[in-house]
Image (cartoon, rainbow, N blue to C red):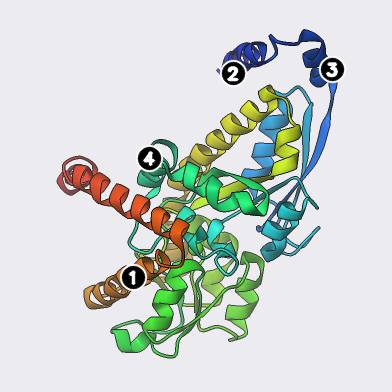
């Protein structure tokens, strides 16, 4: 099956590159022979299950699809640059490609968070609809263009968990003074609820929680959180992940590096990032439950749902924070309008489809 799929992909790609090279067969054969050796830097620990294996799989797919012409070496966080230095390094061309999450760059580009995740916003399926058929990706590319970057959706964890806490959260009062690792717009919501958000890359979370530098953390979900042994540093595991209902991960390509590629290799990146975008969601969907069973049954983790009044308060604050993020400039306004109107429309239909079905199941 796998071989047949690869042959079909190769045939499709061959026909694509054929169209693009009709005008000059000589230059196409020259381009075909050239090998592009790229670096992909990531915000994830090397080979971390799910998040860290996705860029490795992306590079592997591209190597095979291109018969070795696009040869990308993947670097974990801290190997070439620190996790939070990825955006700048790819922007400046120190690496041709990066893999991360757009909300990490909110300090530099406030509206970037819309392309990762929005508190009480869209889930994975809805994000993919917005990005690929609702104008989202075009806005994302417009937002990154001044930074010399071409972004792609390249992974999704699905709805995350609310996180790990060393005390129970029984009321909004319990969030006051809480020092929690939580990136993006969710962090601002926590701040307005009285907490102190901290942005830390994944590789630094465990030590910070274990040593008491932070009181609580969110990371991803059972599959990734178990890999980080977060259950050995905190007892209570809360859901649902109100702050990250289906975060999109990103691949970004330096603009000059992108422009230097022939059309067939560009198309391979388009196709391979879409494959990874779907692949990660499938992997998390398949593995999260088994990891949660292990956490609860083998490690005695206390699973808790955030109380309704806490969720209601966080939702109210989220509306304000998200609306304010849309006021930062003209482009942020267009992104906000596009995102929120797509969410309203899709939620209306999903009330008759996905949601109605899940309620009935
Ligand atoms: Ca997270």
Question: Which residue was labeled with disc 4?
Answer: 134
Nearer the observer: mark 2 or 3; the answer is 3
Mark 1 → mark 3, Cα distance in angstroms: 53 Å
Tell which of 352 and 328 is nearer to you: 328
Classed neighbour count for the residue bearing mark 1: other residues with Cα under 10 Å, few (<14), some (14–19), many (≥20):
many
Q: Which mark is residue 318?
A: 1
Looking at the rendered image, the disc whose residue lies closer to the viewer, 2 or 4, is: 4
Q: Dot 4: what SS?
A: loop
Specify the quadrant that holds the C terminus.
top left
Instruction: Identify the residue position indicated by label 2 in the image.
Output: 9
Q: Is residue 238 left or right of residue 53?
A: left
Q: Mark 2 to mark 4: distance in Å?
A: 26 Å
Query: Residue 122: in sight, yes or no?
Result: no
Which badge, 2 or 3, comes first in the chain's sequence? 2
Counting residues from the start of the chain, the first of labels 2 and 4 encountered is 2
State the residue at coordinates (69%, 63%): 83
């Amino acid at each position: 099956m796998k071989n047949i799929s690869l042959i079909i992909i190769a045939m499709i790609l061959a026909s694509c590159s054929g169209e693009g090279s009709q005008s000059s067969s000589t230059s196409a054969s020259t381009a075909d022979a050239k090998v592009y050796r790229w670096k992909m830097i990531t915000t994830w620990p090397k080979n971390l299950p799910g998040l860290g294996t996705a860029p490795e799989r992306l590079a592997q797919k591209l190597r095979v699809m291109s018969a070795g012409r696009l040869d990308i070496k993947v670097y974990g966080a801290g190997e070439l640059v620190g996790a939070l230095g990825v955006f700048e390094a790819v922007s400046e061309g120190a690496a041709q490609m990066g893999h991360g999450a757009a909300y990490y760059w909110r300090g530099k580009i406030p509206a970037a968070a819309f392309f990762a995740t929005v508190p009480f916003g869209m889930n994975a399926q809805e994000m993919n609809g917005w990005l690929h058929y609702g104008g989202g990706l075009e806005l994302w590319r417009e937002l990154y263009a001044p930074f010399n970057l071409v972004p792609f959706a390249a992974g999704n964890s699905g709805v995350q968990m609310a996180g790990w806490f060393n005390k129970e959260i029984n009321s909004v009062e319990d969030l006051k003074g809480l020092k929690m690792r939580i990136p993006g717009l969710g962090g601002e919501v926590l701040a307005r609820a009285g907490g102190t958000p901290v942005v830390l890359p994944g590789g630094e979370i465990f030590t910070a929680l274990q040593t008491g530098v932070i009181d609580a953390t969110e990371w991803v979900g059972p599959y990734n959180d178990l890999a980080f042994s977060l259950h050995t540093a905190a007892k209570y595991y809360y859901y649902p992940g109100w702050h990250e209902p289906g975060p999109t991960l990103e691949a970004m390509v330096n603009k000059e590096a992108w422009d230097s590629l022939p059309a067939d290799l560009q198309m391979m990146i388009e196709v391979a990032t879409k494959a990874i975008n779907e692949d990660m969601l499938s992997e998390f969907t398949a593995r999260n439950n088994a990891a949660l069973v292990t956490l609860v049954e083998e490690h005695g983790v206390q699973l808790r749902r955030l109380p309704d009044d806490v969720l209601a308060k966080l939702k109210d604050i989220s509306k304000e924070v998200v609306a304010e993020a849309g006021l930062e400039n003209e482009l942020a306004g267009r992104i906000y309008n596009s995102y929120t109107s797509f969410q309203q429309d899709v939620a209306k239909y999903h009330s008759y489809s996905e949601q109605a079905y899940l309620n009935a199941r």
